[in-house]
Structures are given as structure tokens and as C-alpha cells.
Amino acid sequence: MASMTTPGPIGARFLAQIIDALLLMPAVLVLDALFGSQEGLGTIAALILNIAYYVYFIGGQWQATPGKRIMGVYVTDIGGDPLTYEGASLRFFSFFIPNLPVYASLSDMATLSLITWLHILWFLPMLLTEKKRGVHDFLAYTQVWEGRV
């Protein structure tokens, strides 16, 4: 196991999210093509795909999504133990909270503004805490570390 002494760098975590989004994009586009014309079914299918992807990889032996693995970071519980699939699910839903307004019936500008402020507040602690933990990490009792399992 990698040494758990250095918190995962914020830049690596951000780039890992971009990599994971790019890896998921083809499947999301296929789901949208298959279900997009049906009232919200494409969105639900894409959400289920995202849940499965993040929970499977974070709760699995890598303790990291492919994006996190490429960027050299992994996730543990606050005690340094691997996450269970239940813990990985809690982390996903904690991470997902700032995105909930996307699914509300707000005007476009109000939604964008709300999402922006929620993300700032959600991830600001990563800049202010010694272990670079965001609100989602506190809610899910997780820590991201530099290195690989």
C-alpha cells in the first residue's frame, strides 16, 4: 500500500474529474441517443451509469477511478482503510449534492449561479484544510491521498 502521508493534490483531483468525464462521455452520449427523447430517461440512465462507475472503482481494489489512478491519487476512509461499496456510495452522493440544482426547474441563470456558489462553498475547504478535504470528504469520512494502492 502507498504511504498515507501526502494528501492528494487539488490539481490532480480536478484533472482526474475531467479524465473520468471524458471516459464516461461516449457511454452517456449513447444513453442519451437511446433514451433522450423519453421524458428524463436519458438523464436517469446517465446518473445510474455515473453511480456505478464511481462506486465500482472507488470501492474496488484500485480505490480510485481511472482518472484518479492516472493522476496518482486514491481514496480511503478517514482511518486509512479502503472504502467499502457502501462508503464509496456515500462519497458519490456527498460529491453529487452541489449538482442537484441542475435537476430542479430553475431558470438557466439562476441555476448556473446557484451551482457556481455551491461548488465554491463545497470545494473551498480543500484550499483551507491541511489534508485538502472538501465538504464531500467530511460528509463521507474520506481522505484522498497521493500515490497508488
Image (cartoon, helix red, strand yellow):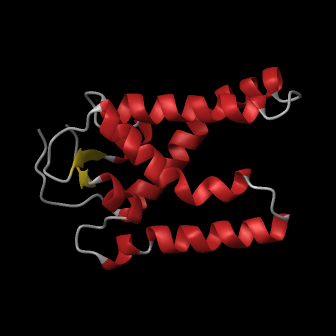
Q: Please state, as top left, top right, bottom left or bottom right, where the N terminus lies in the image.
A: top left
Give the residue drawn at x 78%, y 71%: 110
| Image quadrant in which you'd find residue 54 | top left
Q: Residue furthest top?
A: 34
Q: Residue furthest right?
A: 37
Please indicate, yes or no, whether residue 16 appears anywhere in the rendered image: no
Would you identify the image quadrant in which residue 48 lies? Answer: top right
Viewer-nearest residue: 120 or 10 = 120
In the rendered image, the residue lying farthest to the bottom is 128
Report x, y in % for residue 34.
80, 20
Side of 113 where 123 appears, left or right? left
Q: Is 25 left, or right, of 88 in this rendering?
A: right
Residue 28 placed where, x, y %? 68, 31
- Residue drawn at the location 62% of the way across and 36% of the way down: 47
Q: Please, which residue is most extreme toward the front here? A: 105
As drawn, 110 above or below 58: below
**Point 51% across, 40% down: residue:** 20
Question: Is 147 in front, or is 114?
Answer: 114
The spot of residue 10 in percent (x, y) is 38, 64
Q: Is residue 1 left or right of residue 53?
A: left
